[in-house]
Every structure is written in structure tokens, then in C-alpha cells.
Amino acid sequence: MVCSFNRLMKPAIIVLNWNGADDALECIDSLAQQTLTPAIIIVDNNSHDDSVERFKEYISAHPKSDIDLIENRQNLGFAGGINTGIRHALKRKFRYIGTLNPDAVADKNWCKYIINELKNHKDVGIATGLLLRQNSDTVDSSGDFYTTWGLPGPRNRDEPRANAPQEPGYVFGATGGGVIFRAQIFDDIDPFDEDFFMYYEDIDISFRAQLAGWKARYTPHAIAYHKVSASSSKVPGLAVYNTFKNLPLVFIKNVPGDIFFSIGWRFFATYWLIFTSAVRRGNGWPALKGALASLAKQPKAWKKRRQIQKNRRVSTNYLKSIIHDGPLPNQTGLLKFRKFFTGK
């Protein structure tokens, strides 16, 4: 009976690698030691180091492990790389498909507790846990927000672990750095949007899932430890470029018409405020390139919006109840900006 349950509940976890085999192998080891052991799908995004050879050696040394290796012929970014793994997992008929950042290490009960949230709440399509900074009790994420200012962000980012919610509960969305999806949602919504390449593709899929009637949950019992920006730091300006490219795409695709302008004016002001801040910090060129790239992709985003909004199954009141009112606590510049105009 236990074996039958494990086969039924067994998730597939995708580990995406680009020139980082040291971290990725630690991540894979942590998944191999789970109390609810997942299938592991390693997706290599056209690394130019010895990553693929090292993964093959690892698989050969663990012949009883359920590990698949997919070699992409080009770097498809986070969104495209993970989608490669999702398609593979769907072909294998997994009911639960997750992702764990290659620079993260999961506690042995990470899979079990996240799967419990999905198993016990049939309205939930996305579940996540508590992501902590490596070697510290500082929170990286306890789920994701989307705000009335059109900006997403991680809950409890940079706060001590004690501040994170101590009980499971509903959240707006989940970081792609540590999440498990109910595979059924991919029959309802598309997987990650590959126009994003990387950054904010996770809040986009969370928003699309919410619009389609799928909820997201957080459990503090599923813990993983994350090296922050281990991948993006390899390419200077990459985070800034993708931030300015992708933030407008999230807004255009997902914010419904009846709250579009109330959020939109704040988002417009905020976008150019943080653009000015990027210029002041010496990141003006990648910010400008990102803004121009966003303009080029926006016609396609408007086209996608039509289908997303057509598929919407939730009320405006529900959306208002899950969108965070105001900038996040760590967005101090925006809090000052709001106070200047509203006095609050």
C-alpha cells in the first residue's frame, strides 16, 4: 500500500543547469535523499564546461536512481529550459512537476510537505515552501506577492526566519526557485512564457494560474537553502536587463481590465522611478536595452492577454483580496514615493 501511494504521489523535479555542475550536483544529491523520492530531470542549457560529462558520471554511479538528463543545444534561459523538463515530465505522465534551483539544497522532507499541500487542497495548483539563504536564518522567499503598484516580490525577503509565517496558508504565487505544480494546470494554462527568458516568469505563471481559478499555497515545513544570484551574477547586467524587459509583460498579460488603470498609473510611475535609480547606479545601459526589448515584445503580450483574460474564472473582488496593497516592506524608495503623494 505504501509503495502504491509513493508511486502515485511521486513528483518529477527539474534541475536546470548552466555551467554550474558543482552546485547542481549538491542540489541533485539533496533530492536523491528525500523521504518522498522524486524522479529527477536534469536539463543542461548548453553548458560550455564539463557539466554534461559530470552529470553522466553521476547517473552511472547511481543506476537505481530515477534520473533523466536532457541536453539543450542552446541556452533557452530559465523559462525555456524548465519548459523542456516540463514537456518531458508530462510525457512520463507525472501528476506533480516541480523545479528546484541548481544553487539550492532541499531539506529531506521538502518534497513530502509540498506534495501534502497539493494532495490535501484540490483547488491548489502551485505549492511552495520556505526558501532560506544558505548558511543563515535569513528568508529568501516564503511565497510571492503581486502588489497594487504592479511590482511582484518575495514575501519576507531579507527578514529573519522567525518572521516567516509559521502555519501553511494561501499565497499569491511561488518562486520558480523551489515549487511543485499540479501537472493538471498545464492542461489549463501554458507553461512558462519563454519570452521572459529569465526573471518574473514565475510570477507570470502564478498570476495566470490564479486567473484560471488555481490557487497557490505555502508551507513552512518544506525548507530549502539557496545561494542567491549564483546564476545571474555570471553575466553582468543580466538581472537589470530582464527586469526592465519583463515587468511590463507581466502587467500587460495579466492585470484584468477592471483594475488595469488603478494599478497601471502606479506601475507606470514606479517603472520609470526604478529606471532612474538604475541609471544613477551605473546600470542605465542594460536598463535601457531591457526597456526597448520590452517594447518589441509588447504586441505579442497584448495578443496573449486576450486568451488569458478569456480564460479568467475568478472575480475582481477575489483578485483584490490576494493582491498586496502597496509597495513591499523592503521597497523603501517606493514607500517614500507613496507617502509623498498620498501622505500614507
Image: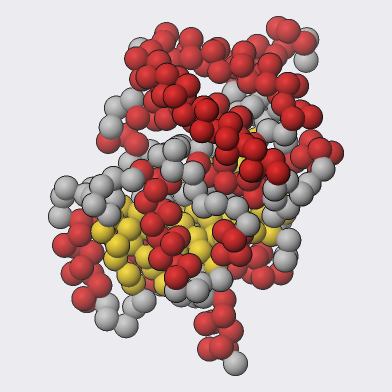
> Is 177 placed above or below 67 here?
above
Observer-nearest residue: 299 or 330?
299
Q: Is residue 164 left or right of residue 68?
A: right
Identify the residue at image location x=57%, y=80%: 8
Identify the residue at image location x=65%, y=65%: 118
Which residue appears farthest toward the right when viewing the image? 317
Q: Is residue 104 left or right of residue 157?
A: left
Identify the residue at image location x=26%, y=59%: 71
Identify the residue at image location x=53%, y=89%: 3
User: Whole-percent x and y of residue 177?
Assistant: 47, 49
Mark yes or no: residue 325 visible.
Answer: no
Quadrant position of residue 317: top right
Quadrant position of residue 254: top right
User: Whole-percent x and y of residue 249?
Assistant: 54, 31
Where the C terminus falls, by quadrant? Answer: top right
User: Whole-percent x and y of residue 280?
Assistant: 42, 8
